[in-house]
Image (cartoon, helix red, strand yellow):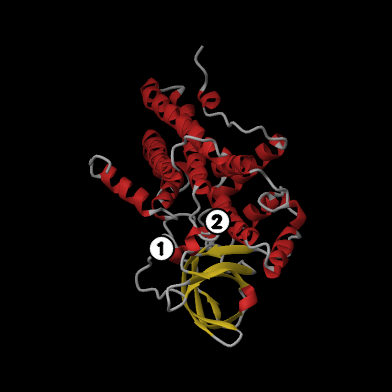
């Protein structure tokens, strides 16, 4: 028996809150078309996440959170991305800060921040791309000078999502001897300036921008990790978004494939490419969830990211192509999804993944 496309694109993790998640995805889908391209903060999208408890999924119970297991959290990210990539992108940056605070839970300041997040009194975000994947041209990275009580920070944090909305951010700085450290930095600290949001090709409502630090003083007790030469090797300290970003890509691809299926009901020519894309999605999703579960003998996280990037680009462009001219109208989700898919080529995209994409675009064999 031939299974429907939706059956073949089925999610895999049992979820006790299934009806609530379905309702949240539906709400986000309605709101996304209204707020995704706004220059203002997407208040209704974020309120929907807060009311559903999504902002507490990644928090431990002792901090007032719901302590969602990683495989289920990854799946929920993907499902939210089928409704609104903007909303779940902001959430992913919020949660990235939470993960780094949790990794530093021995620090009283980190525990206090986590309690504030758990009680809904604070909104965190993260800005550490200058240590991982970003080398924004013309931007001076954050450097630190040691003082009697701590450090003085100067420079620019190049990519910070929801910076104007955040109460504090987790960021990084470099000392002149090559050591780095992470710090939890209140956004109202003297010398912190949030720039106007970047004019992005998509996800405009995320409020992603750069943050300028001029003579910002932090005490040694505020450091979350380091100073260390091998900061990137410390679990939870730096890293890139990894499986979470791949989940967002596969969620966006899911939405495009389900939409393409609705067109294929009356167009037999769409069925073969749709079936091929669905089969590829199924394989990629199973690999992602296996990695999130920590199963042995797996495809690497980097290879999963490369596959997810490729699939979201082809799935959204396939839907745009099938929609023809109607899909190119600003009112149609097809064009928005295709623009949003470009995000995965540039956000937290490790060099090997970017190089693999360039070789594929050029028709070259993988290295």
Q: Residue at x 47, y 34 (%)?
A: 297
Which circle, 1 or 2, is nearer the viewer?
A: 2
Residue 276 is marked as none
Q: CA gap, disc 1 to disc 2?
A: 20 Å
How many C-alpha atoms fall within 10 Å of the one at disc 2: few (<14), some, or many (≥20)? few
Q: Which image quarter holds the C terminus?
A: top left
Indicate which disc, 1 or 2, sits on the residue closer to the N terminus. 1
Mark 2 highlights which residue? 235
Locate residue 123 relative to residue 78 in the image: left or right.
Answer: right
Secondary structure type for disc 1:
loop
Q: What percent of the width, then of the height, locates residue 83? A: 57, 43
Which residue is situated farthest in the bottom direction here? 148
Q: Nearer the viewer, residue 143 or 93?
A: 143
Residue placed under numbered mark 1 in the picture: 134
What number of labels is visible?
2
Q: Residues within 10 Å of mark 1 (few under 14, many from 20)?
A: some
| Residue 220: percent from left, percent from top | 61, 78
Between residues 115 and 188, which one lies in front from this camera angle? 115
Determine the image quadrant of residue 277. top left
Name the residue rendered at 65%, 75% in the picture: 221
Residue 298: x percent and y percent? 47, 36
Q: Write the residue at 50% across / 25% down.
A: 5
Q: Position of residue 358 (x, y in %)?
A: 29, 48
């Amino acid at each position: 028996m031939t299974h429907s496309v939706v059956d073949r694109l089925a999610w895999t993790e049992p979820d006790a809150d299934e009806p609530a998640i379905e309702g949240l995805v539906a709400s986000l889908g309605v709101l996304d078309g209204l707020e995704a391209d706004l220059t203002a903060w997407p208040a209704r999208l974020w309120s929907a996440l807060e009311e559903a408890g999504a902002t507490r999924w990644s928090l431990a119970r002792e901090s007032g959170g719901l302590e969602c297991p990683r495989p289920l959290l990854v799946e929920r990210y993907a499902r939210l991305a089928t409704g609104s990539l903007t909303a779940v992108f902001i959430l992913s940056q919020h949660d990235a800060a939470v993960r780094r605070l949790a990794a530093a839970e021995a620090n009283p300041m980190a525990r206090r921040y986590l309690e504030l997040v758990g009680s809904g009194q604070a909104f965190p975000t993260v800005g550490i791309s200058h240590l991982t994947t970003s080398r924004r041209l013309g931007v001076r990275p954050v450097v630190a000078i040691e003082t009697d009580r701590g450090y003085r920070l100067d420079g620019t944090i190049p990519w910070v999502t929801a910076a104007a909305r955040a109460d504090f951010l987790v960021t990084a700085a470099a000392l002149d001897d090559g050591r780095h450290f992470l710090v939890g930095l209140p956004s109202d600290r003297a010398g912190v300036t949030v720039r106007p949001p970047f004019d992005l090709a998509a996800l405009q409502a995320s409020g992603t921008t750069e943050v300028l630090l001029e003579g910002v003083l932090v005490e040694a007790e505020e450091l979350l990790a380091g100073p260390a030469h091998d900061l990137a090797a410390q679990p939870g300290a730096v890293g890139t978004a990894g499986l979470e970003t791949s989940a967002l890509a596969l969620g966006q691809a899911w939405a495009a494939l389900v939409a393409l299926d609705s067109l294929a009901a009356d167009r037999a020519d769409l069925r073969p490419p749709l079936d091929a894309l669905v089969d590829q999605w199924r394989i990629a999703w199973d690999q992602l969830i296996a990695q999130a579960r920590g199963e042995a003998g797996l495809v690497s996280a980097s290879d999963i990211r490369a596959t997810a990037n490729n699939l979201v680009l082809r799935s959204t462009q396939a839907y745009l192509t099938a929609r023809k001219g109607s899909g190119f109208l600003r009112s149609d989700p097809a064009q928005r999804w295709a623009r949003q898919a470009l995000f995965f080529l540039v956000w937290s995209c490790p060099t090997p993944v970017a190089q693999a994409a360039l070789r594929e675009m050029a028709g070259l064999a993988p290295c």
